[in-house]
């Protein structure tokens, strides 16, 4: 299937983010009943954003670095935990990856399920990198506060190391739907935080508030720590330094990373059911 026609399969799941009306597939684009039109790029994504201002730090270089770094297997154990939680849910017909970045988790899940996968991010640069992947994921540039998906259509939402919008998540989830949320663990990237400790304000990371907020909105069915410490060097370390939001406001040249030999990637994987 080509990169435009694949959207035909999901047109019935979508709604117009401007007026909320149904969307149809017409002449290689998506059009709502009020004639709001969203072009499907030949590159394989749809832009639902009304305006697009680049987000500080989240540029092409950031997502290319992230793409390369993820290929280095450093996040595979996180992805394995997410995929196993998703595949454990039944039925699994529609999955939505919210804030998918350059698409690592959605593309990997796509290889293991026949479910339709919608994956979106507000950063069009991320979606452009994601859409290079041949997996038939439906990539969307979209705002998480106004997701172009109809009510009650989604079986499973992925929200991995990225902010959530629980009002929208609850709206698009069906009655038995689940959210798989990953938040950084206490030791996540601790070697890098140690190296930059003089420049980082929140040295002690705590996700208590995030966990509490999640439990306010969903019935927590499981919570599992996925943690691994791996050797790291050279280009991979340089990519990590470019891709981590941890160092966005830090003068990277003043951070001595020369003693870093290994890196810990740790996430708390939460599964919550719609209440
Ligand atoms: Zn419309």
Image (cartoon, rainbow, N blue to C red):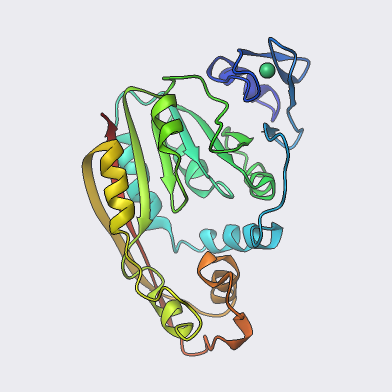
Q: Residue furthest top?
A: 33
- Asked whether 29 or 165 is in front, the reply is 165
Given residues 221 and 112, the one toward you in this image is 221
For the C terminus, the quadrant is top left
Horizontally, residue 41 falls left or right of residue 259, namely: right
Q: Residue at x 31, y 63 (%)?
A: 227
Depth check: 193 or 83 in front? 193
Which percent across, then down, holds residue 168?
Answer: 46, 31
- Left or right of 260, for residue 53: right
Could you tell me residue 20's position as x and y percent? 59, 18
Q: Quadrant of residue 133?
A: top right
> How many numbered marks appear?
0
Q: Residue at x 54, y 38 (%)?
A: 144
Q: Is residue 111 visible?
A: no
Place of residue 8 in the rendered image (x, y in percent of width and height, measured from the top left)? 63, 18
Residue at point 52%, 49% (across, down) = 104
Q: Identify whether 210 is placed above or below 206.
A: above
Quadrant for ligand 1 reads top right
Depth check, front residue: 180 or 91: 180
Residue at image location 42% in from the left, 37% down from the top: 112
Percent across and percent down for residue 167 are: 42, 33
The answer to whether residue 6 is above or below residue 264 is: above
Query: The N terminus appears in which quarter of the rendering?
Result: top right
The answer to whether residue 50 is left or right of residue 211 is: right
Image position of 215 with respect to 169: above or below: below
- Please say whether residue 211 is visible from this viewpoint: yes
């Amino acid at each position: 299937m080509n990169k435009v026609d694949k959207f035909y399969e999901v047109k019935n799941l979508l709604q117009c983010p401007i007026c909320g009306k149904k969307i149809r597939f017409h002449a290689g684009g998506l059009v709502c009943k009020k004639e709001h039109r969203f072009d499907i790029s030949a590159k394989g994504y749809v832009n639902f954003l009304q305006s697009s201002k680049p987000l500080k730090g989240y540029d092409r270089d950031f997502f290319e670095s992230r793409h390369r770094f993820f290929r280095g297997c450093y996040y595979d154990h996180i992805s394995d935990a997410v995929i196993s939680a998703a595949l454990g849910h039944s039925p699994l017909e529609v999955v939505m990856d919210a804030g998918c970045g350059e698409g690592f988790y959605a593309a990997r899940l796509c290889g293991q399920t026949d479910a339709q996968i919608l994956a979106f991010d507000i950063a069009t640069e991320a979606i452009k990198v994601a859409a290079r992947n041949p997996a038939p994921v439906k990539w969307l540039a979209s705002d998480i506060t106004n997701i172009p998906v109809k009510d009650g259509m989604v079986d499973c939402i992925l929200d991995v190391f990225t902010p959530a919008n629980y009002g929208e998540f609850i709206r698009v989830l069906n009655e038995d739907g689940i959210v798989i949320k990953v938040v950084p663990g206490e030791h996540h990237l601790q070697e890098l935080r140690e190296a930059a400790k003089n420049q980082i304000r929140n040295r002690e990371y705590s996700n208590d508030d995030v966990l509490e907020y999640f439990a306010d909105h969903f019935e927590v069915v499981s919570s599992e720590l996925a943690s691994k410490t791996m050797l790291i060097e050279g280009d991979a370390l340089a990519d990590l330094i470019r891709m981590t939001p941890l160092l966005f406001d830090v003068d990277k040249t003043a951070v001595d990373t020369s003693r870093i030999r290994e890196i810990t990637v740790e996430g708390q994987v939460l599964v919550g059911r719609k209440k």
